[in-house]
Image (cartoon, rainbow, N blue to C red):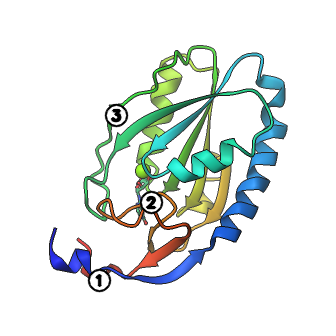
Amino acid sequence: MNSEKNDLKIKDVLFSKEDLNKKINQVGMQITEDYKDKESDGVIALCVLKGACFFFSDVVRSFDFKLYLDFVVASSYQNSSKSSGKINILKDCNMDVKGKHIILVEDIYDTGLTLQFLREHYIKKGAASVEICVLLNKQYENTKDFVKYTCFDCPDEFVVGYGIDYAEQFRYLPYVGAVDTKNLD
Ligand code: IMP
Ligand code: MG
């Protein structure tokens, strides 16, 4: 890691702790409305690690129906600020998804490659349904059919915090901020 990467600073707070709490609770109520009659089939909230870790833990605790939790690790960025375009599943969901309703919980929709790949993967494995829930959507206008739940339309910035990283830095921040991209690769 070079010194420029270590010197990165947050230039703006885009979504404060309060903004995140309020919106995530609203989305949680909406998901509860949509899923409460599906709980007998089995609903799995599937966290796309690591970026969605805090979002996932907050949003699932705002749901009011019975559900299972599981985790998947997918990678496309490989310590860079640009997607490599190739998705790898490094750790898959442990539960049997057949006949279950999956809610894929992800930090950011950008090119959509990660979520399209994961959605197909769980449909092929026999999930009854797969819906997408993201904290931030960088393509909000174009993805209304694909991404069912978006907390925030995300400006065209490289964002970090609340689980989201740049080269593993900044995940611990309690808010989402933008970093200066001029020194990023
Ligand atoms: P996609 O496959 O291009 O949609 O990539 C989405 C993934 O890229 C997210 O889960 C993030 O891990 C990462 N990503 C996209 N934009 C950003 C950003 O601004 N900051 C940090 N990670 C990002
Ligand atoms: Mg990610």
Q: Which numbered mark, 2 or 1, is in the foreground of this view?
A: 2
- Label 1 environment density (alpha carbons within 10 Å; few <14, some 14–19, many ≥20): few
Question: Quick check: marks 1 and 3 in contact, CB under 8 Å?
Answer: no
Residue 25's place in the image compared with 66, above or below, is: below
Q: Quadrant of ligand 1?
A: bottom left
In the displayed structure image, the side of residue 160 where residue 14 appears, left or right: right
Check disc 1 and report its element: helix, strand or loop: helix
**For the residue marked with disc 3, what is the amino acid?**
Ile
- Label 3 environment density (alpha carbons within 10 Å; few <14, some 14–19, many ≥20): some
**For the residue marked with disc 2, what is the amino acid?**
Ile
| Quadrant in the picture for the N terminus | bottom left
Where residue 3 sits: x, y (%)?
17, 78
- Label 2 environment density (alpha carbons within 10 Å; few <14, some 14–19, many ≥20): many
Circle 2 residue = 164
Q: Would you identify the image quadrant in which residue 139 lies? A: bottom right
Check disc 2 and report its element: helix, strand or loop: loop
Circle 3 residue = 89
Front-lying residue, 47 or 99: 47
Circle 1 residue = 182
Q: Which mark is residue 47?
A: none
**For the residue marked with disc 1, what is the amino acid?**
Lys
Where residue 166 sits: x, y (%)?
34, 65
Residue at x 36% of width, y 31% of height: 91
Front-lying residue, 151 or 68: 68
In the displayed structure image, the side of residue 163 where residue 175 appears, left or right: right
In the displayed structure image, the side of residue 21 where residue 93 appears, left or right: left
Check disc 3 and report its element: helix, strand or loop: strand
Q: Is residue 156 visible?
A: no
**C-alpha distance separating marks 1 and 3:** 30 Å
Within 8 Å: ligand 1 and the Cβ of disc 2? yes
Where residue 177 sits: x, y (%)?
50, 74
The disc, 1 or 3, on the residue closer to the chain's N-terminal end is 3
